[in-house]
Image (cartoon, helix red, strand yellow):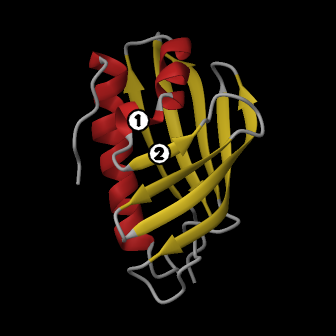
Amino acid sequence: METKSYSTSILVDKSAAQVFDAILNLSGWWQGEIVGSSNKLNDEFTYQMGEVHFSKQKVVELVPNKKIVWLVIESKLNFVDKKDEWTNTTVQFDISEVGGKTKLTFTHHGLVPAIECYGGCSGAWTMLIEKSLFSFIMTGKGVEVF
């Protein structure tokens, strides 16, 4: 059984601070309804995409311009049998310098091929990170991906 968590990376011609600030501005790149804040340690926010997806995240690690980690404390995915597959998983953003550019590595720990939502969820994250967040970092405007 494959247990490697989903991960993707982007490389941008922007500073680590710009990437960090863009990630924190959730409504700029993550489509759906977002309520709450992700700007400080222990902040909580919810994400809702229609009747398809609900999740509640808590900011458990926040290292300015380096790292952001959210713990999914509640989830309801209506397109899979085990509706709470995301609960107790973590979403991590690592920011580093690579050859004069800024690298963002995104990992959803616990989103592994063995769980039912892996295909749909990993595909959604790919679009959100590689298309919408990338665009938001580079231009100040995210793109609709679903």
Look at the numbered disc 2 and give the secondary structure of its residue: strand
- Check disc 1 and report its element: helix, strand or loop: helix
Among all residues in the image, which is located at the extreme front?
35
Please name the amino acid that badge 2 sits on: Ile
Q: Residue 77 location in percent, x, y? A: 47, 74
Residue at 48% across, 90% down:
81
Amino acid residing under circle 1: Ser
Q: How many marks?
A: 2
Rendered image: mark on residue 34: 2
Marks 1 and 2, the one that precedes in the sequence: 1
Residue 40 placed where, x, y %? 71, 29
Which image quarter is the C terminus in? bottom left
> Can the viewer see residue 90?
yes
The image quadrant where one finds the N terminus is bottom right
Query: Horizontal placement of 77 versus 126: left or right?
Result: right
Q: In terms of depth relative to the viewer, which is nearer, 102 or 48?
A: 48
Q: Residue at x 65, y 35 (%)?
A: 68
Marks 1 and 2: CB-CB under 8 Å? Answer: yes
Q: Residue at x 27, y 17 (%)?
A: 139
Q: Position of residue 85 (x, y in %)?
A: 58, 75
Lateral position of residue 73 relative to residue 2, left or right: right
Mark 1 lies on residue: 27
Residue at 58% across, 65% down: 4
Q: Is residue 117 above or below residue 29?
A: below
Judge whether residue 99 can be spotted in this image: no
Q: CA distance from mark 1 to mark 2?
A: 7 Å
